[in-house]
Amino acid sequence: MLAVQKEVGDDRLFMKVGEVLGASSRTLEDAFLTAIRTRMAEIQGRDFLVKQIKAHRANKAEKVRRGYINDSPPRPANSLS
C-alpha cells in the first residue's frame, strides 16, 4: 500500500482505500487505517533516528579531526607504556 502510494504521489491514498473498505465494514476500515498509520509512524521514526545518528557521527568526526577528543581506544589501567 505505501509503495503504491509513494509511486503514484498521493500521500492520502490510504484514506481513499480506507473509504472503500469502510463501505463494507467499518471495523475493517478502522483496522486498515490504524495499521497504515502505524507503519507511516514507524518510517518517520526510523528516518528521524537515521538523521540523528548521522549528525552525531559527523559531529564526533569533526571533533576528532580538530583534536577536541581522542577517538583511540583507552589503554588498560595496568599498562606499563
Image (spheres, rainbow, N blue to C red):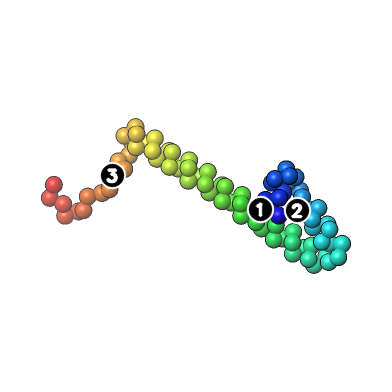
Residue at which label 1 appears:
40
Residue 46 appears left or right of 5 = left
Direction right: furthest residue: 23
Amino acid on which the number 1 mark rests in the picture = Met
- Mark 2 touching mark 1, by CB under 8 A? yes
Residue 40 percent across, percent down from the top left: 66, 53
Which amino acid type is marked by label 3?
Ser
* Mark closest to the chain's N terminus, 2 or 3: 2
The residue carrying mark 3 is 72
Residue density around tag 2, few if under 14, some if 14–19, many if 20 or more, within 10 Å: some
Q: Which residue is drawn at 83% across and 57% down?
A: 19
11 or 77, nearer to the observer: 11
- Label 1 close to label 3 by CB (< 8 Å): no
Q: Residue at position x 77%, y 50% from top? A: 13
Q: Sort mark 3 into few (<14), some (14-19) or many (20+) by Cα contacts within 10 Å.
A: few
For image coordinates 83% across by 65% down, the residue present is 26
Q: Is mark 1 on a helix, strand or loop?
A: helix
Residue, disc 2: 14
| CA separation in Å, label 1 and label 3 | 39 Å
